[in-house]
Structures are given as structure tokens and as C-alpha cells.
Image (cartoon, rainbow, N blue to C red):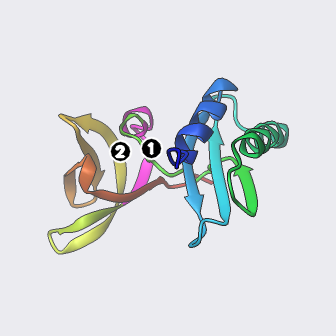
Amino acid sequence: MGERLDVDALVGEIVDGLGFELVTIERSPRGRLLRVFIDIERGVTVDDCATISNQITRVFEVENVDYDRLEVSSPGLDRPLVKLADFERFAGHEVQLRTTLPVDNQRNFTGVLQGLREGAVVVETDKGELVVPFEEINKARLVPKF
């Protein structure tokens, strides 16, 4: 039967190979739309998105990946924090996060990211310090500054 292709790993290799960071991949419910979010220190341009999109499309053709639509974009000002390293890198920024389980009867928090402490994410909220184990974070994103 051949092994099932790991599309996320494939996309990750392509994006890394071109010098970008893969932030996250979102899929539509039936997986027909792939939305790939990339980042780079200098900021992502429209040309960057086109380059990555063309490269992914070519590789998907070769590997016979079945999909209807591919979108490549920057993560935006409200960038999702996905990897452990993101929580270190964006320390000092305001974040919104949602926990898997309630903490003091609450699951949504906003505060200033303090970074990591022993594998847990530390956020300074208006009610004090919140320490959440990384694996208990459901969603986290930066709060845009205008």
C-alpha cells in the first residue's frame, strides 16, 4: 500500500528549505483547503508567499498530494503561538490564550507573556502571574498593537 505521506512534514521541509519558518497549517473540515502560514524575521512579502506556494504546488504534483486549494500567507499581527520556542521568542508581548482545562473557573486569559519556566508558559495577567503547562494550552496568539 505504501506509507501515507506526511503532508505537514513535507510542507515543513519545503518552507525551511527556502529559509522561512512554518508557523502553522490549517485545514478546512474535509482537508480540501490547506492554509499555510509562514514567517521570516524581515517580514513576509507577497512574492515570498508566491514563491512558497509555487514550490509546494510543484512538490504536491510530484508526490500526488490530493487537495483543492492552497493558500500561503503571513501569520498576521495576531500571530498564533504554536511551538514552545514561540513562547520564548515573543516574551514581553501581549498575548491571548485559551487553556484546555479551566484555571480558577476561567479558560481565556490576556496578559504579557513572560516566557517559559520549566516547560510551562508564564503570563502576567491583571490578576497576577499565570503559569500554564505548555500541553494545556489550547490556543495562543499575539495581541496586535496599533
- Distance from the alpha carbon under mark 2 to that under mark 1: 6 Å
Q: Residue at x 60, y 65 (%)?
A: 31
Q: Residues within 10 Å of mark 2 (few under 14, many from 20)?
A: many
- Most extreme residue toward the front is 1
Q: Is residue 92 magenta?
A: yes
Residue 135 x, y percent position in the rendering: 26, 51
Q: Residue at x 40, y 39 (%)?
A: 92
Q: Quadrant of the C terminus?
A: bottom right
Q: Is residue 65 left or right of residue 10?
A: right
Q: Nearest the camera: 103 or 129?
A: 103
Residue 39 x, y percent position in the rendering: 63, 38
Q: Is residue 30 left or right of residue 141?
A: right
Q: Nearest the camera: 111 or 98?
A: 98
Residue type marked 2: Leu
Q: Earlier in the sequence, mark 2 or mark 1?
A: 1
Q: Which mark is residue 43?
A: none
Numbered circles on residues, count: 2
Q: Residue at x 61, y 28 (%)?
A: 16
Give the magenta part as a residue range: 86-97
Give the secondary structure at mark 2: strand
Q: Which mark is residue 113?
A: 2
Residue type marked 1: His
Is residue 76 at least partly visible in the picture? no
Q: Is residue 56 above or below residue 144?
A: above
Residue 5 x, y percent position in the rendering: 55, 45
Residue 6 x, y percent position in the rendering: 52, 45
- Most extreme residue toward the left is 104
Q: Is residue 79 above or below residue 90?
A: below
Q: Is residue 87 left or right of residue 19?
A: left
Q: Are marks 2 and 1 in contact (CB under 8 Å)?
A: yes
Asked which quadrant contains residue 42, the reply is: top right
Q: Which mark is residue 93?
A: 1
